Image: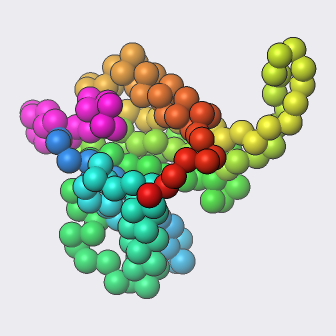
Amino acid sequence: LKDFPGMNIQVEGDYIIKKKKIHLGMAAALPNGNLIVPVIKNAEEKNLVGIARSLNDLATRARNKKLLPDDVMGGTFTVTNVGGFGTIIGTPIINQPQVGILCLGAIKKRPVVINDMIAIRDICYITLSYDHRIVDGALGGSYLAFVREYLENWDMDRTLY
């Protein structure tokens, strides 16, 4: 989102508000079947380990009914994971007043063509829902392509700290 500030926007009434800070909403299913979206505040200041720790803390507190009102407010963009239910693809609804939500499906082995050969690879479908009043197809498609490329080219030897 740092590289795509047009995705980190909120719509409030007739106003379009560009947000400097990234407050990442992470949809979490509760044991009773309800859904809640706790927010990782200032996500742009955290590395992957910091985000994972924040996510784990928020998810644990959500399941134990220990979230504070501030923990679920102020999100600027949301990520949801339908893959946890075994679903390979989803079309999430935007968490207003945000303008986008990224959805991750289950990682499943699939046949793919690589250099004219069929190979089995782990595949994860990602989808992006966005408010077309603010985000056009070029921005939405570019952001989704960036996320795909980032994930596909992940360096397994990368330092996480």
Q: Quadrant of residue 64?
A: bottom left
Q: Decide if residue 37 is on the left or right side of residue 154.
A: left
Query: Colour scheme in the image?
Result: rainbow
Q: Which residue corresponds to the image point at 34% horizontal and 38% vertical from the top-left?
A: 1
Q: Quadrant of residue 66?
A: bottom left
| Residue range highlighted in magenta | 1-18
Point out residue 104 in the picture as x, y percentages from the top left corner: 56, 46
Q: Which residue corresponds to the image point at 29% horizontal and 49% vertical from the top-left?
A: 44
Q: Which residue corresponds to the image point at 70% horizontal and 55% vertical from the top-left?
A: 86
The image shows residue 74, relative to residue 153, as above or below, that is below
Q: Decide if residue 119 is on the left or right side of residue 57.
A: right
The image shows residue 138, relative to residue 148, as above or below, that is above
Q: Is residue 141 magenta-colored?
A: no
Seen from the viewer's position, the closer of residues 46 and 17 is: 46
Point out residue 111 in the picture as x, y percentages from the top left corner: 85, 32
Q: Quadrant of the C terminus?
A: bottom left
Point out residue 87 in the picture as x, y percentages from the top left corner: 67, 50
Q: Decide if residue 153 is on the left or right side of residue 65.
A: right
Q: Which residue corresponds to the image point at 38% horizontal and 49% vertical from the top-left?
A: 78
Q: Quadrant of residue 134?
A: top left
Q: Decide if residue 9 is on the left or right side of residue 33.
A: left
The image shows residue 112, relative to residue 88, as above or below, that is above
For the question of whether residue 34 can be seen, the reply is: no
